[in-house]
Amino acid sequence: MASAGPAPGARLPAFSAPRSSPAVPPIVVRVAVPSPLRRLLDYSLPPALAGGEIRGCRVRVPFGAREVVGVVLDTTDRTDVPADKLKPVRARLDPVPVLAPDLLALCRWAASYYHHAPGDVIATALPVLLRQGEAAGRRKLPVWRATPGGRGAPASATARSAKQAAALAALCAHEDGIPRALLDGLGIERAQLVALQKKGLAEEIEVDVEPGAGDADPVHAPLLAEVPLVASADQANALAAVRAQIDAFRVFLVEGVTGSGKTEVYLQLAADVLARGRQVLVLVPEIGLTPQTVERFRRRFNRPVVVLHSGLNDRERLDAWLDAASGRAAIVLGTRSAVFTPLASPGLVIVDEEHDASFKQQDGFRYHARDLAILRARNAGVPVVLGSATPALESLHNAASGKYAHLRLTQRAGSAVKPRMDVIDIRKQKLVEGLGESLLREARATLARGEQVLLFINRRGFAPALVCHDCGWTADCRRCDARYTLHLDPRHLHCHHCGSEAGIPRACPKCGGTDLVPVGLGTERVEQSLGTLLPGASLLRLDSDTARRKATLPRLLEQVHAGKPLVLVGTQMLAKGHHFPHVTLVGILDADSGLLSADFRAGERLAQVLVQVAGRAGRAEKPGQVLVQTRQPDHPLLVRLLKEGYDAWARDALAERRMAELPPWTRLALVRAEATRDTTALDWLENVKAAASALLDDSDLLLMGPAPAPMARRGGRYRAQLLVQAGNSGELHRFLERLVPLIEADPESRRVRWSLDVDPVDLY
């Protein structure tokens, strides 16, 4: 994982600015424009656009041959740009800043820490519509209403048209107006409204869209809509620890076994903060967790809750963003980019499943939302709670060193107990579509008792490869060093790395043979085989294919929560945060893939997934059982994890990382490059390494590589990488501050697409 947040008091890299000169234009603003430039651009601000605070306001400025929307970060009376070259701001889009000082500070720090273009960082912090220059106001809803003259009109005004009379009566009955969407349902046609408008009896206006019906009046309604649960001893201790410092910055790592009630701790802490009139920011790793988390908060509180994630349209996202900025939204809940949401009065930050790699952006601006959440809480002087059953090793290290307060929830809530975990050695077992007889036997018994079964395999599709039985040809992606995955619903070949698709060939393109065989297991294949192996059983599949549409995931989860016996097949979407009270058996079909990876984080990810998936079993009164199918039953990771738990395994893993001088004991940065020719990226990185080597002096930094990426060709481009290892953060950033300008000044850099990933979580 990433650094798990900057250490308090750490040196913050600053923007490099041009050297000042005595030339003094009237007013100069420094603007972050949406571009790869790692600096601000100077523009003159016409007096007509001055007045009030300009920092944090959007402006429209010339940039090359076009105009763009940028954000003012600074003002000055000095610039290196000659007066005749200094371009003026064309328009000021905001009378008051859309980005408050705290968010500007967060963006500036992030741009410096990740050595990224400030304009890209600012763009990440703004909703799409604001980036495009739209007004920073709630959307307007067109409605028709009766005019004062219409409300007092005599019957003779519409005597010639019964339809007009009926329409006017309906408008008079709705003083606030009737939205267009409801007019058809009332049988009111536009022609009738236009006729009334011409008579001065009706008018079409636009009104502000107000929050949905699920949000109660935050002033007059009581805070709680339901009574909190009685806290267990562990929960009470955790609550007391955070409450003791509720008005100060402190990082609290809440490590709770699956089903221990971490969400209840979040809810009770949120109640304390909301009672003080302050806001709560909650981050979750994926959209799949958002609906159930939102439902928990809305069910508990009579306060407005807004949601921000990539599944919203641009208008919905802007409205939620504005509600948070105004303070109208008491609770802001979202995925990674929600860390940049403005808050009028922040009181608490919560990062659920803090270990999850989804919090790290993997392209463009490669920030880590958990780490920025910590920084944001520090700047605001409020506590931040990191919750997980399987904390990142970096977070455990910070807790052991005293940087974080470590709070443990060791018991499941209520009468639930930890599930029993057993390994199934499948080396000599006959498998039917990846399922051993002992696992099938337990599944049948579980269904017969009226309980539910969860089968986990972290591969979607029908099969990860399509192979010709006659000659050995495989269906390889045309653009990647990867095989196509076979999908049957609908029928096609799909590359899960670049997204390209192809039809399923009728014959082998190499030998002409027609015996094309799917090899390996995916969720589709397991689901299909269960129809034969468990006849009559209700089957549900949950992966990113089935959950793509908005309404699908809630519908599937509703069936699971109904409690009827069924088999749920899915990927890691099932592993995080879901509460399935009727699941008593979890089967992990293939635990071996994570044991064979060369990535030093692979073991950590496997341990986290196994524990998280296992945690779906036995979360209510009935005990749970977890069966792990493996061909390596004696592997040290499995033995330690299953016998002694995640904490014991994590202690060993941290000791191994220390001996190997890997994070969190050292810091990493990855210079990535890609190009259309197979040697271009590698050759360019060799030149970068030569330039970087001259900067090392007597430091302990190591340069490893360059080498082709583990998947050398992806999306039609050849990829390579150079790894930088440093003993501490300060040493790393001092080096990168000198290296990045050299890279940018190198004309050869234009031949490649390059990026810098600070604290990478994925070396793939």
Image (cartoon, rainbow, N blue to C red):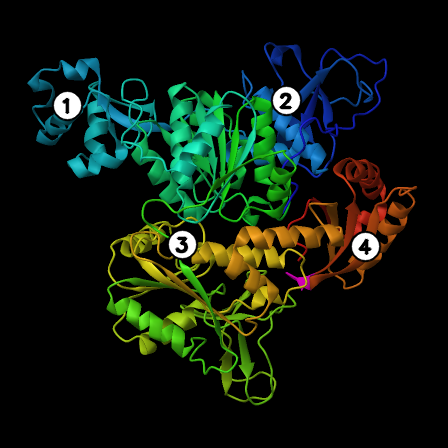
Q: Is residue 524 magenta?
A: no
Q: Helix, strand, or loop for circle 3?
A: loop
Q: Is residue 332 above or below residue 514?
A: above
Q: Helix, strand, or loop for circle 2?
A: loop
- First in sequence: mark 3 or mark 4? 3
Residue 361 falls left or right of residue 176: right
In the image, the segment drawn in magenta is: 712-717
How far is the residue under mark 1 from the one under mark 3? 59 Å
**Which disc, if any, is residue 418?**
3
Q: Residue at x 40, y 68 (%)?
A: 489
Q: Helix, strand, or loop for circle 4?
A: strand
Exactly how many numbered labels are in the figure? 4
- First in sequence: mark 4 or mark 2? 2
Q: Of discs 1 and 3, which sits in the foreground?
A: 3
**Residue linked to disc 1:** 173
**Which residue type carries mark 3?**
Lys
